Image: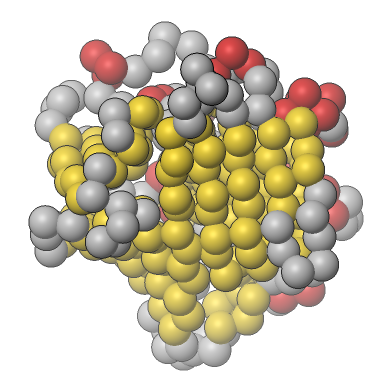
Amino acid sequence: MSEATLKMSNAGTEIEINLANQQLFSLKRNGVEVMWPGGAPESRRPKTGWPNSEIVMFPIIGAAPNDKIRIGDKEYPMGQHGIARYIPWRIIDPGTFSVNMVQYHYGQEEIRGKNKQISVFPEPYRLAKTYFLSESGDLCFKIDVSSESDNNLHFALGFHPAFLVPNGAGAVANRSSNDSTTLRLSEVRKAEGCAMRFEDSRAIEYLTDSFKVTMTHNFGMTQVWDKGEGYVAIEPITAPSLSATRQPDAELGAMPRYITLRGHGHMSFFGTIKVEPLDIRK
């Protein structure tokens, strides 16, 4: 497998993308690394732990009951977090400070995922993912969803990056207008599924003894997932995990917070990640 990567830097921030799986696996500010390198080229990947650094969750978040979804009166097999994580991205227009990627799904074809599990999603779509380094060194990300048919497209979307947890300690704080909750990662590890969710969330701070990550986004909710293996996922999401809703089945048009995009419609979701190294000698 290729070890080739794409690197970009601006204003003290450096990012690196693995060209083999199109994953962002490194984010450094003034030389301080904050991302979990599970999606790095094989020679730079940890031997244990999550084998990714970031994925896009689409058209579902979490695990559907019995690994099946329903659209209208038809049922389809669907693995955890959907199919976008298993469809390659085509990198286009790599620039000095930005990179664009696209993936297409044409509908009905079988997508093989973890343990060769088959998923089927009948609606064609286009996803576009963009990374951009701002003049101040913040990492901006955007995910565009486009319907490629006359039919309604029912979906949830999530961005699932994982960050390092130095010394096993850290805290996540929600800074939205109606919520200023702070969670220790030790609390998250004890929660069901090792995950907790902020229902109203547009600004999240992740603080460790060596760096602070501030993420702002327009997805509406944020999920935090930490198994105690040296990384934490801070996930902007548009809807709760299906496994948390405890619905008897997953009829996508009726799921809480799931979006209905009209035929040939388009929606954009975006956010910013700011990294601040901390001087631990103070």
- List x then y, in percent, for residue 116: 47, 32
- List x then y, in percent, for residue 224: 68, 41
Q: Is residue 119 placed above or below 208 in the rendered structure?
A: below
Q: Quadrant of residue 143?
A: bottom left
Q: Nearer the viewer, residue 165 or 260?
A: 165
- What residue is drawn where x is 31% and y is 57%? 136
Quadrant for the C terminus, please: top right
Is the image coloured rainbow, by chain, by secondary structure, or in one colour?
A: secondary structure
- List x then y, in percent, for residue 232: 59, 31
Is residue 132 visible in this depiction of the protein? no
Q: Is residue 76 toward the left or the right of residue 196 in the image?
A: left
Q: Nearer the viewer, residue 274 or 251?
A: 274
Is residue 95 visible in this depiction of the protein? yes
- What residue is drawn where x is 17% and y is 41%? 7
What is the number of callouts on the image? 0
Q: Is residue 42 toward the left or the right of residue 231 in the image?
A: left
Q: Is residue 260 placed above or below 94 in the rendered structure?
A: below
- What residue is drawn where x is 25% and y is 24%? 41
Q: Is residue 258 placed above or below 134 in the rendered structure?
A: below
Quadrant for the N terminus, please: top left
Q: Is residue 149 toward the left or the right of residue 155 in the image?
A: left
Q: Nearer the viewer, residue 152 or 165?
A: 165
- List x then y, in percent, for residue 2: 14, 27
